[in-house]
Image (cartoon, rainbow, N blue to C red):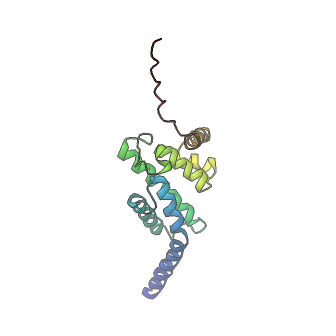
Amino acid sequence: MRERRAFQSARRAREFEAFVAGAAGRLLHAATLLTAETPDANPRARRLLTQALAHTYACWDRPRGEDPYDRARQELAVRFAHAAWHQYGGLGRARPDPGSVLARLTPQERLILVLRLYEGVAEEQTAALLGLPPERVRAICARAMTTLLHPPRGPAPALAEVAPS
């Protein structure tokens, strides 16, 4: 009995290591996009990924038909939304460091944009994950795309005073 458990534990660890070897890079990139950090300085994204992978490992032996990448991505998104909500009092207020193009977006806009465009998650699945109607997800995604594609202009140039004639 003890040998069987040890064998199962070793098999579980090997399967999870193989999963992490294949998926961690893409998940870290998604986490970095969510936090709007730079790829070479992303401690929040790394912490977010570590927590999501720890939860995925804890649930590794549960329903076998489930895709572990989907589970890890969902955990990453939920943890990001939860952290943004508790840190800033809502998904709409946080502004990260301005070094990233995505820094102009709210956390909710970044979350929806990353899920929809980078991860390719369907609108209905994104809506279900976030507890929003699909129409709201569509509107937020469109607003985020508009913000990225048409950044706000700088201040208008000052008019030179004309000397009276």
How many numbered marks does the figure carry?
0
Residue at the spot 48% in from the left edge and 43% down from the top edge:
104
Residue farthest to the left? 87
Residue farthest to the top? 165
Q: Nearer the viewer, residue 129 or 20?
A: 20
Q: Quadrant of the N terminus?
A: bottom left
Vertical placement of residue 4 versus 120, above or below: below
Vertical placement of residue 162 versus 140, above or below: above
Vertical placement of residue 107 versus 45, above or below: above
Q: Nearer the viewer, residue 71 or 61?
A: 71
Spot occupied by residue 87 in the image (x, y as percentages of width and height):
35, 47
Spot occupied by residue 47 in the image (x, y as percentages of width and height):
39, 61
Residue at the spot 45% in from the left edge and 88% down from the top edge:
3
* Residue 75 visible within the image: no
Vertical placement of residue 133 versus 82, above or below: above
Residue farthest to the front? 165
Q: Nearer the viewer, residue 15 or 31?
A: 31
* Residue 86 visible within the image: yes
Compared across the picture, whether 126 is left or right of 36 comes to: right
Residue at the spot 46% in from the left edge and 69% down from the top edge:
57
Spot occupied by residue 35 in the image (x, y as percentages of width and height):
44, 53
Residue at the spot 43% in from the left edge and 66% down from the top edge:
54
Residue farthest to the bottom? 3
Q: Nearer the viewer, residue 4 or 86?
A: 86
Spot occupied by residue 148 in the image (x, y as percentages of width and height):
55, 44
